Image (tube, grey):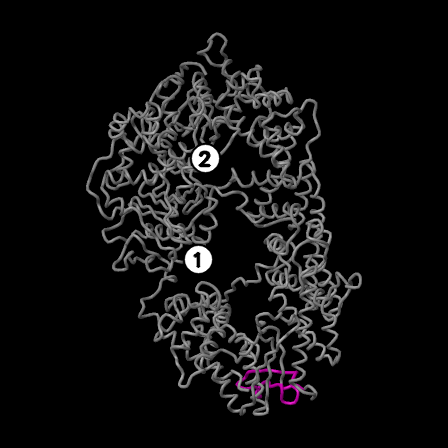
Amino acid sequence: MTGMSSSPRFHLVSGNRLDRLAAHLGARLAAAQDLDSLAPETVLIPQPSLRHWLLQALAERFGIAANLDLCTPSEFVWRLLRAARPELPEHSPWERERLRWRLYALLDTLRPLPAPVRAHLQRASASGRRDALPLARYDLADALADAFDKYQAYRRDWLAAWEAGEERDDWQAALWRALRAAAPDTVPRATLIGEWLARHDRQRDSRIATTPPGLPTRLFAFGTMHVSPDVLYLLSVVAQWIPLDFYLPSPSAEYWGDVESLRERLRRDGVAALPAALADADRDNPLLSAWGAGGREIVAQVFAYDVVLPEREIERYVRPRSDSLLHRLQRDVLDRAAPRPAPWRAGDESLRIHACHSRLREVEVLHDRLRAMLDDALPEGPRFDPPLQPRDIAVLAPNIADYLPLARAVFGGLDADDPRYIPFSLADRPQAQSHPLVGLLFSLLDLADAPLRASAFHDLLAVPAVARAHDLDAAALERLHAWFDAAGVRWGEDEDARERAGVGRWREYSFAFGFDRLLAGYAAGDDAAVLGGDGERRDGAFAPYAELEGGDAAALDAALTVHARLRALSLWMRNAHPPAAWQQRLAAEFLALLAPESDDPDEAAARRRVLDALADFAEDAGANARDAEPPANPPSLPAALVRRALQDTLMQPSPHQPWLSGGVTFAGMVPLRTVPFRVICLLGMDADAYPRREPANDVNRLIDAVQGRAPRYPGDRSVRDDDRFLFLQLLCAAGDALHISYGGRDARDGSVREPSSLIGELLDVVETMHGAEARRALTVEHPLQPFSPRAFGASDDGRGVDPRRWSYRDEWRLPPTDERRPPKPFALTDSTLDSSTTRAKDGESKTDETTLEPPDREALQRFFRNPAQWWLQRCLGLRLPAAEDAERDREPLGDNKLVRYHAIAALIEDAAALERDDDNDAERIVDDARTRLAARTLLPPGHDGDDVSRTAADVARHLLAARDDARGDEAPRAVAAHGDDAPHGIAFEFDDVRGATRAIAVAGKLNAKRRLRAGLDHLLLASVLGEAATTVLIGEGAREKPKKGEREVDDAHPIERRVWRGIDREDARARLAALLALWREGGAAPLPFAPTTSSAYAEARAKKSPPDERAAWAAAQTAFDPYGDFGGDADDAWIALAFRGDDWFADFDDAVARRFRAIATQVFDATESNG
């Protein structure tokens, strides 16, 4: 770069408000000029996101904004370079995206490799991971491409020296020279800029300088603060030939190109300068000094008149009022003035800092604060004039992708007609989050690295576009989910896939095994048969899954068709392929899963986005082979590398996504850095998140310069300095209010977490202005839970009201203590409870006692098993994930109790099924246990399965023998009651009664749930057979621990029996009537009843006469939460949800505690065994 460049047509327009600068730009655009009216006006903008705001601002002010060519400085510079050299391509092969792939190919072929490169790649190879070497090569190539891209902008002299043969021992110089030699016909951007400046800069030699081709008639540069020195120099040369208006947004009207923080001053002058530095700091604006380093370079360059010499300087500054803390801060920055002490005005809400426990709480608090601002109903009158609108609000974060799903849940979780609803738009979101179809592409690529899992397959089928293309509605998807789960589909294609995964060779729990079961069940419908299998053990034998019917064929066929395509793609992706082949195959498989056309514009846009990403990948990754001299074959790339490359692209926001499309705008901080909004909200201002640290990088040598380890050039950018200046820009861009939040406490242990250092520095300034009271008032501590009384205005000490906290989520609000009984689930208000429990999908009441039909036997059993679950599912239609949902990708492992229980239960049920079919050879069920259990995926694979089947067979044999002894030799008969004969309408049928005795064998111990079920069945049996009825429940007993010195007997299987003797028919019916009344009561509100806990109370109460109620209540409390923080009914998610805010054991005399005791007594007095 040379000295002063005379720029006689360079007009400098500076101001502190972007809207005022836009107004001046609009006036200049509208001014009459002797210009070609059809030629578009060229306006340079710092980033594409500003395009939408600028067009909108111009249109609102002037009625129209048309015929404008908005482009970034780098795009404009490349246009000029192409105009000067028409042979240049549309995109430079030296841009980072393509340079990355050129370096990847070079690192694969260059010999010898520089020592640092060789060491990096050898470490990756030593890891032994599949595809580790190509991924390491790609990562290194990407880091080098980023460094070389920056060198072209900020170290043009380095590259020129390297090309001239200097720095022979520098490994980066050697790589750069190798790159140039590999494609001699391509010219780096830095070289082209040097040639262009030499040819067209009049200051260098006016005799040879020529008019640059491709220049517009005039040029406007709007808000382009962060340009490299070369680009600024080039623009100054452009201004030698055409008028150029340069719009510089500046937070201060004073010259501030010389600001420096106290740390910078001491680093430069040493500790001896501390007194003078402190004195100077007291006279300067602390925010501009501490945060201005990221913007002072451009101010210093422009106003030093070394690079440009403006013909005119125009100021468009707006002086903020002094009516609020935020405006006073902005005014002091504008004047570059030190803060001045002034009285603190309580109630000033222009600046608030919110400490929350999690990102979710940050968004919940944000919604409440914005709702309060939009309502603007303060006793002293409105704060916002004119009234605040959602489009006047921006919500920004360092990594907005972390907050977008939460924003969609919190802001989008309310109906549009809800008065609390706030319209919003999610801008700047990664393309991968923009639509499920983008995730579908990654789902396909995942098949190359890991065996297909059942959950992933169901997720793929559930993508709306895929489901629609295969005619799979919600019911069909639910059926498929259930079939696959029941048929034992867990992971892997077949036994070959297991072997490749290194876990042995076995077919059970694979897709092939599950499909065998499903197809055989559809064809044969006999789940008792066992088909196939190899060898004496019949490994791979399967039992048909017989629950499919004729109408299920379409759904199953769709699933099989999709799976077949996925399997073929998975096999193809095990090998490396050229980029073009990847594009063609992935695009074909992607489109094959979808319908040919889509009427949904979002889906159509997502399709184009995926196909464009694949095309760009193939173009960039294959460009090196085309540019090489002579042309070479493109590289073959593994799937892991293809995925990484596409992820790098699709995790970036789309350049075509809409901005400022209405409502509150959620976006990243950089794209809207100087755009004025009346309210700006900054989320995620944590100490470890902002300002960011310089990335750990031993490749990019510019980091050495910004960290003081190497000479620093003008324009060198620091990530931390950029973030600090960005924070200052946003503070100055907020028109009426600035909302800041951070994770102030750990959600697990409540420990304090520090905010960003910038928040501390801001509070220091506030304290200097208004004292410690203002500092305390600005920071608001929010509770962990949204239903905490503190979230609804209760002060921290519980003795007053803190108006800084107020939630609009009435459904979370707990009523006062004296209003909490009778218990209301979810602590709902009366109106909410009424609407949520009486409205069904068809408009009928779900819980009105008069409309409840009497339950059948199974329904009554389900109710008493868990009344809270029954109420939530029946009345609110809720579904909570079951514990087994998390296990649907896993086969059972080891000889654990749950696996053993299911195996024993299956053998007992198989024996009962044979008896119902008049097959007297039930014993063979036990003898053939391993084959039968493995065929239905009830055993873990390998030797563990052998152990489980052996134990299960032994236990089942003992249980069945005890059952046979209990029921005698009489022939089985059915006892049933339907219609008018059913007791109180409860229909039932038992087909396993011998005489008047019903003997039941169950797997596991005779816990409260199993005894309650048997007791309810006994009441039904006695309602018909009366005093003759007998029920015997047989289960596994507790093993006695061996005495000291004795060995435990492995084959001992103790048996436990419980007997229910007959009772009078009328007594049985009366007990059933009382239980039916509880069932009806449980339709209006959940009953405080849980079999295990309630049984513990009933048993302890029955031990003493008269009963010791308090001792029994204490025993129940122990059973409810046996270990203090886990176990027991306290862990039941249904109970926790239904009785939120209602503790059964808070107070012995509490209403819910009394009701718990009464129900426990009533239920178990009626159903407990009496024999």
**Element under disc 1:** loop
Q: Position of residue 959 (x, y in %)?
A: 65, 77
Q: Residues within 10 Å of mark 2 (few under 14, many from 20)?
A: some
Q: Residues within 10 Å of mark 1 (few under 14, many from 20)?
A: few
Q: Are marks 1 and 2 in contact (CB under 8 Å)?
A: no
Which residue lies under the disc numbered 1? 415
Q: Earlier in the sequence, mark 1 or mark 2?
A: 2
Residue occupying the far top of the picture = 207
* Magenta residues, start to end: 973-997
| Type of the residue with mark 1 | Asp
Q: Position of residue 577 (x, y in %)?
A: 70, 38
Which residue lies under the disc numbered 2? 51
Q: Position of residue 613 (x, y in %)?
A: 60, 39
Q: The C terminus lies in which quarter of the figure?
A: bottom right
Q: Quadrant of residue 122?
A: top right
The numbered mark at residue 1011 is none
Residue found at x 35% / y 35%: 728
Q: Height in image: 602 above or below 1068? A: above
